[in-house]
Image (cartoon, helix red, strand yellow):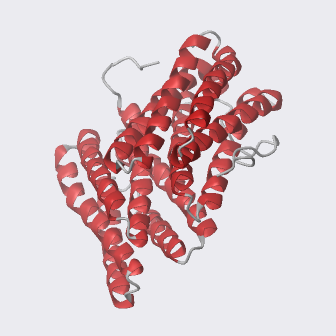
Amino acid sequence: MAVASAPASAADQAVRLQALLGQHSVLAADLMRSRIRGDDNFAQAANAALGSNTDAMTALVGQLFGAATGEKFRPLWSEHVVALFAYAGAVAEQDTAARTRARGELVEYEEELADFFAGASHGRLSPQAAREAVAMHVDHLTKQADAYAAHDYATSDRLYRQSYQHTYDLGLTLADALLAARDRATLRTPIWRLRSQLGKVLAEHAVLLEDVTRAAVTNTADFDASAEMINGNTRDLAAAVDTLFGAPTARRFQSLWASHVELLVAYAGATAAGKPDRRHEARAELRTFEQRMAAVLAPATGGRVSPADLSAALQTHDQMLLGHADAYAARDYRSAQDIADKTYEHMFALARRLADGFGATVAARLPRGGAQTGYGGLAVVNR
């Protein structure tokens, strides 16, 4: 299911910008939480991943908007990351003075970043709008850290999702303001919008599934809140399928997708508990899921993607998530993070192939509301 390796257009790169910004939000939140927990080994892996994300964003900004713009971007973004790290450390140490200093630095960097983006847009993005967007990003991250430290996991996870979604969408705001007119027009086409939105919700699935499997492996107090996050994503995916193909298909999709989530979390729990028979059972049941889900989605592509190809893509996705659970349970956090990065990238390749398969006619009916297909996800998973 690999996408042909043609030179990426500016519109393709705009999706890449969205993806990297959304990933930055997740990695920053994970880093801040690990500092609050005092989990130094995980924090090191998250920090390394955040550095790689910054490198990739800098390179992409340079490609899209010129090398000079990229060179100006890196130090501003890096200082912003350092300040988030310092804020989390102050929260962990309950150091009010340090927390106030870090918050003040973040406000300063918010203004610098916003002015940078507004200036690069040549008037298409106002300084006020840019500042509001960047301020909301920082507000999401700092408040989710505060709630996490207070053991208010439901609030923290709600902000975790909002942060990802807002920062991902910020990529479109920036691309629409900074790209040339001909490229900006492409961002309004139905097929591009479907690629973008499918990528957003599928990549979030991978992120949230990894979060809940980490909680399942460690049997931590935030498991229930993490489970509700992935349930929310499952409902969003079902809403997209409902809008595109109708409620009957959405109900079939949601039932299968929820079982998929449950099996992956059950595998993680069995790994932590040392239950090889349950691990093997979950793997076998996932093969059945992959085939059944391919049978649901492949016809919607009008023959552009075969059931065998789609099943293989879903199997790759599942193997990555199982590998992540194995590495995390073994406390090999660097490998777990490397797998998480590859899984995140894979979801955008899958989203593009599906969007192109569904076609421009279906793409015109983008998700615009909730599906009345019930709830699904982790209701029956035992830790």
Residue 251 falls in image quadrant? top right
Q: Can residue 306 be seen in this view?
A: no
Which x, y percent locates residue 245?
74, 26
Q: In this view, does 88 lie above or below 345?
A: below
Q: In this view, does 338 lie above or below 31?
A: above
Q: Is residue 345 visible?
A: yes
Describe residue 49's horizontal placement relative to residue 280 as left or right: left
Who's the residue at 67% across and 55% down the image? 228
Q: In this view, does 226 lie above or below 272?
A: below
Asked whether 327 or 91 is in front, the reply is 327
Which x, y percent locates residue 382?
69, 50
Asked whether 145 or 368 is in front, the reply is 145
Which x, y percent locates residue 230?
62, 49
Asked whether 149 or 383 is in front, the reply is 383
The mark total stands at: 0
Residue at the bottom extreme of this rendering? 97
Describe residue 328's horizontal placement relative to residue 382 as left or right: left
Asked whether 86 or 258 is in front, the reply is 258
Who's the residue at 75% across and 34% down the image? 255
Which x, y percent locates residue 90?
36, 80
Who's the residue at 60% across and 58% down the image? 223
Residue 284 falls in image quadrant? top right
Q: Is residue 43 above or below residue 248?
A: below
